[in-house]
Amino acid sequence: MDKQNVFAGRSLCVIEDFSKEERMYLFSQVKTLKQAMEQRDEQKLASYRIDDKDFGIYEVFLENSTRTKESFRNAANFHHAKVSEMSAENASFSKGESYADTFNTMIGYYNSIFIVRSKVEGLCKYLEEACSAYAQRNSLYRKPAFINAGDGKHEHPTQELLDEFTFLEDNNWSNDSLHLALVGDLFHGRTVHSKADGLKIFKSVKVDLIAPEELAMPEFYVERMKENGYSVRIFSSIEEYLAQDDIASKWYFTRPQLERMGDRILQKQEELRRSITFTKEFLPKIKEGTKFYHPLPRHKVTPTIPTFLDETPLNGWERQSINGMYVRIVLLSLIAGRIGSDFVPTVKKEEAVREDYITEIDLTSKPMKEKHVSEGVQPIHNGIVIDHILKGDNPGEIRRHMRLISTVLGLDEQKGGDWVSTGNDDQTYKGIIFRPGSYDLDRKQLKRLSAVAPGCTLNLIKDGRVIHKFRLYLPPRIYNFEDLACTNEACISNPEQNEGVPAMFQRTKENTFVCAYCNKTHTFKEIWKRHNK
Ligand code: CP
């Protein structure tokens, strides 16, 4: 493997795994390859080929697919590589085997790239971690790479690559600006979720979201688009969208997945479909040069892009689908290290900044005595006092949360009390937990307390004096605690999956926590789901 090649051996689990400039490089390669394919330029094509019959590319599709599976299979065959497909129905999952054990087995047989589609969100990210460790401990010469071919409602990064390529193709290769209407089931559609980060390759982005409330884009992705600097507008139907003048010249339709939404929605399905289906009456309102796209498949009875449009210049979806194979040939070529060594990144990856979320207050000059902790509470002689809990919240919520803190810290069986008070400086409520006794909280316990009671202060009291006082803030990452859980039942780290994957969260700018596997947003209270049940 070429060590200079930044693409070699890389996984693509979410679109952000490849930076904007890496994606632009990939697109320039796809453009060249597509021309070479069309001109049958064999010499040029050979420069992309892995051309190694021992290089293993494995397709593992645990959900149905035509385009992604077949374009990857044809792309892999182009490479003259060893192409395999796992038959999910006959695999040992039915005997209760875990994903890690299943994929590790195939890695042991010298397979290097895995293309995985599954309902389980974040599966590829987890496999990359688990299977790299397996490859290392078994001295396998190549670390496996994983390509997410669609995971539940989460992401579909290779579809995003081919969508971006097609938009650029239709933008005369300019990435200056994009005005895109996203129409359809924006709630379930993983292809539109990948757009929240994917469209960042364009310098100026305007996104119009067209869906009835029941199929609306999840708030997390809308916020992400805004954070990324996109201008975002929301409409409940195509009719409402066309009643105003600022209409996009690119429309991206998705298939409604109403079957996932229960009886209440099914009763309204005709109305919902009408709001996201294009009809003849809308044609006069469309600008000259407009293109329609669709990741496909479209439904043969109720397509959102009706078939009478196939023969019109609006049809961008057929070329979009064909582009899928070119994009996937280049992606495999990059990950195999066959091309890409001439790419030199100009943008440095941001280094993680170490944050002091646990700060100890210096008491050496003036040791503090815990005098008036609060009304009705006797100062304790030895023990801990956790103060300022949920300051500013209402008393009921503060009491509920103190019970959670007590459980998370293992203080339920100790003597002491929980109190709701108002601060000395203002009249807002806050919680205080007292536990008399002998306590010595280590760094890990302080981290737990920061994560479950951000904004609190912790006083360690000995012989009537405060000997240590800490102020605690939300940590940037929370992981390595067995009682954390992602609340998304489709996530690989959810306990219901029984895969033994520990939950891991990253703090956002809004001080919420996103699951490192499926990106679901949580408040700091929700991540302790095992206690919240
Ligand atoms: N676009 C897409 O993912 O289609 P398939 O489900 O047919 O792979």
Image: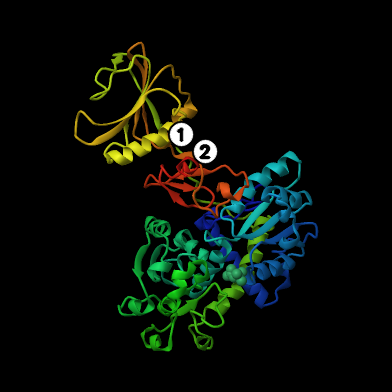
Amino acid type assigned to the residue bearing label 1 in the image: Val
The CA span between labels 2 and 1 is: 8 Å
Are the two marked residues, 2 and 1, in contact with CB atoms closer than 8 angstroms? Answer: yes
Residue 515 lies left or right of residue 34; in this view the side is: left
The answer to whether 452 is drawn above or below residue 293 in the figure is: above
Q: Nearer the viewer, residue 401 or 517?
A: 401
How crowded is the residue under tag 1: few (<14 C-alpha within 10 Å), some, or many (20+)? some
Give amino acid for label 2: Asp
Q: Decide: few, some or many residues near mark 2? Use Cα within 10 Å; few <14, some 14-19, many ≥20.
A: some
Residue 31, image quadrant:
bottom right
Image location (x, y in percent) of residue 375 = 23, 25
Residue found at x 58% / y 63%: 158
- In the rendered image, which residue does mark 2 sit on? 483
Q: Toward the viewer: 318 or 96?
A: 96
The earlier-in-sequence mark between 2 and 1 is 1
Look at the image and tell me whether residue 175 can be seen: yes
Judged from the image, the secondary structure of the residue bearing numbered disc 1 is: helix
Place of residue 527 in the rendered image (x, y in percent of width and height, measured from the top left): 46, 43
Q: Quadrant of ligand 1?
A: bottom right
**Colour pattern:** rainbow
> Is residue 528 found left or right of 25 in the rendered image?
left
Residue 493 in view, yes or no:
no
Q: Position of residue 338 (x, y in %)?
A: 69, 58
> Which of 254 and 529 lies nearest the eye of the viewer?
529
Residue under label 1, please give it. Answer: 408
Residue 464, compared with residue 481, is above or below; it is: above
Q: Position of residue 161 (x, y in %)?
A: 55, 64
